[in-house]
Amino acid sequence: MDTQTKRADVAFTVVENRRLHPRFVRLTLQAADGLQPAQAGQFVQVRVPSSLHSFLRVPISLHEIDAAQGRIALLIQEVGEGSRWLSSRAAGDRLDVLYPLGTGFRRPASAEASLLLVGGGCGMAPLYGLLKQLKQGPKPHAGRIAFLTGARTAADLLMQDEIAALGAEAYACTEDGSAGEKGLVTVHPVLQEGAFDQVYTCGPTPMMKAVAAVAQAKRVPCQVSLENKMACGIGACLCCVTPDKDQHHRCVCTEGPVFDADILGW
Ligand SMILES: Cc1cc2nc3c(=O)[nH]c(=O)nc-3n(C[C@H](O)[C@H](O)[C@H](O)COP(=O)(O)OP(=O)(O)OC[C@H]3O[C@@H](n4cnc5c(N)ncnc54)[C@H](O)[C@@H]3O)c2cc1C
Ligand code: FES
């Protein structure tokens, strides 16, 4: 996914607000003049005008990218003032969106490679976008793709039918055992068997660290998408930096948010 991207500040119109879960909505947005080239793993910064801290935009992953229709979708988890404002937008509302930002997921060298995607919470947003690009993009991936989702309960599992409908193997772990394997994603046999050429993960940091550790132990490359707190989103304020294994600071909003896990100072 080596698309050349050019950042733009664009007005989008909300075309649909669909609630997927008591805490998650999917917003579909229409660009007036077509989309900038963008790839899964990149993100947008949305202006939240009603917020008390409105000078800070809210960073949100590109969840779906439909270049033909000039539409993107965002998966919003309601955690605070900004995300609640976003999740209450209705069809016809306008949003000021700076995009595409950061670097996205990199595809494996071989189109036959066996891939495992591991997601939880709002980490499902970029991983589902990656799955869609792999399956429906201009060069569909020919190899095996498995998608493992972690959640607290069966009711918290997002998009399982949509993942299966795209032709991926869908696996789940729930903490209470109400669906899939009982426990955290790291207990699941599909991860433990390690029969993959590449792992991609996004979700809560402890989950990503644990997934990356399993992948590293099995010598499988792992890309992680970090969700560090951000302010400018364009490399100017350095509030998002994370240390790499050489104790150098990596700017998450420009060098990431997607990194090879083995370069990080975890
Ligand atoms: C690259 C990137 C991609 C993201 N993608 C998505 C996405 O697709 N969907 C989505 O819903 N959210 C995503 N987030 C997280 C989202 O930006 C935050 O949840 C949001 O900024 C919170 O703003 P707020 O005003 O609602 O809450 P605030 O009032 O700012 O904070 C509410 C609570 O959320 C915590 N919080 C704030 N920002 C973050 C963060 N970045 N990570 C973890 N906790 C945070 C705060 O500490 C506080 O406890 C992403 C973040 C980054 C950096
Ligand atoms: S958020 Fe400002 S440099 Fe990354």
Image (tube, grey):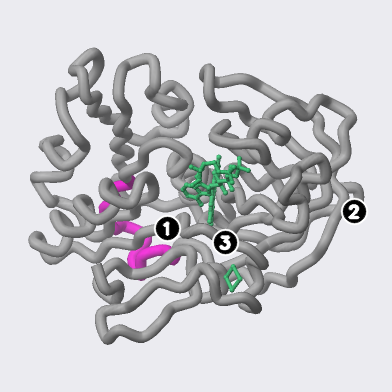
Residue drawn at x 76%, y 43% is 51
Q: Which label belongs to residue 225?
A: 1
| Figure quadrant of residue 49 | top right
Evaluate if marks 3 and 1 touch, with contact meaning CB atoms under 8 Å apart: no
How packed mark 2 is, by other alpha carbons closer than 10 Å (few <14, some 14-19, many 20 or more), is few
Q: Position of residue 11 (x, y in %)?
A: 87, 50
Q: Which label belongs to residue 230?
A: 3
> In the image, is residue 169 above or below residue 6?
above
Residue 245, can we see it? yes
Q: CA distance from mark 2 to mark 3?
A: 28 Å
Question: Which residue in the structure is indicated by mark 2?
Answer: 33
Q: Nearer the viewer, mark 2 or mark 3?
A: 3
Dot 1 falls on a residue whose secondary structure is: strand
Q: Position of residue 215 (x, y in %)?
A: 17, 58
Q: Position of residue 125 (x, y in %)?
A: 51, 41
Inspect the image, locate mark 2, and give the three-letter code of the amino acid beneath it: Asp
Q: Is mark 1 within 8 Å of ligand 1?
A: yes
How packed mark 1 is, by other alpha carbons closer than 10 Å (few <14, some 14-19, many 20 or more), is many
Q: CA distance from mark 2 to mark 1?
A: 29 Å
Specify the segment rendered in magenta.
Answer: 106-117
Evaluate if marks 2 and 3 touch, with contact meaning CB atoms under 8 Å apart: no
Camera-nearest residue between 224 and 193: 224
* Residue 227 relative to residue 84: left or right: left
Q: Nearer the viewer, mark 2 or mark 1?
A: 1
Inspect the image, locate mark 3, and give the three-letter code of the amino acid beneath it: Met
Residue 193 among magenta residues: no
Q: Is mark 3 within 8 Å of ligand 2?
A: yes
Residue drawn at x 21%, y 25% is 175
Q: Which label belongs to residue 129?
A: none
